[in-house]
Amino acid sequence: MDRDNDFKLVNMEKQKHIALVAHDNRKEDLIKWVRINKDKLGKHLLCGTGTTARMINEAVHLPVKAFNSGPLGGDQQIGCRIVEGDIDFMIFFWDPLTAQPHDPDVKALLRIAVLYDIPVATNQATADFLLLSPLMNEEYERKIIDYSKRMHRK
């Protein structure tokens, strides 16, 4: 088995394209985190699901491109942008104690993020570690596994 040829390299620029997502019970937590990290995040291009993007823009005055709200397809829109290579990084403050009507969309979004090897933070501690990483200010090559090659070999 030659797994060395089972991936492609995708360059992540110094300026990251970061998706900001939060469930309803975590939106205020995300806004507080963005406010604390405004200077660092302001160096990058931000997008998010509808309500979250609007709330961050209004509260912190950072430009955040808004997609639809999560239950109306925003999670899927972000997933599509990950597949297209337009999102490098995701901060998703999710609520682990509340069932969401769009849980399958959330699971699909997280699956796509793993499949395309983008950094994902689902809580504040991980978001802090990722944002403080020296890699945030450098180019980085992601290794995207070509699962079709691996499946075809079996």
Image: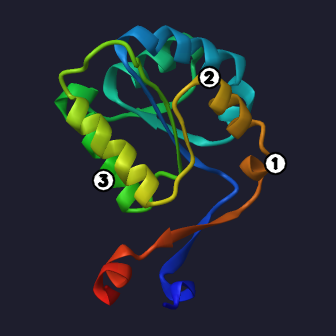
The amino acid pointed to by label 3 is Cys
Q: CA distance from mark 1 to mark 2?
A: 18 Å
Q: Position of residue 43 (x, y in %)?
A: 69, 40
Q: Position of residue 7 (x, y in %)?
A: 50, 78
Which residue is drawn at the image coordinates 45% and 37% (left, top)? 47
Give SS at disc 2: helix
Residue 133 vs 100, above or below: the answer is: below
Residue 78 shows up from this direction: no
The amino acid pointed to by label 1 is Pro
The residue carrying pointer 1 sits among few (fewer than 14), some (14 to 19) or many (20 or more) residues within 10 Å by Cα, namely few
- Count numbered badges in the picture: 3
The residue carrying pointer 3 sits among few (fewer than 14), some (14 to 19) or many (20 or more) residues within 10 Å by Cα, namely some
Counting residues from the start of the chain, the first of labels 2 and 3 encountered is 3
Counting residues from the start of the chain, the first of labels 1 and 3 encountered is 3
Relative placement, left or right, of 113 versus 35 is: left
Q: Position of residue 48 (x, y in %)?
A: 41, 33
The residue nearer to you, when weighing 55 against 136, is: 136
Q: Are marks 2 and 3 in contact (CB under 8 Å)?
A: no
Q: CA distance from mark 1 to mark 3?
A: 27 Å
The residue nearer to you, when weighing 108 against 68, is: 108
Residue under label 2, please give it.
124
| Residue 80 tag number | 3
Give the quarter of the figure containing the C terminus: bottom left
Which residue is drawn at the image coordinates 77% and 50% (left, top)? 137
Give SS at disc 1: helix
Instruction: Give the quarter of the image for residue 100.
Output: top left
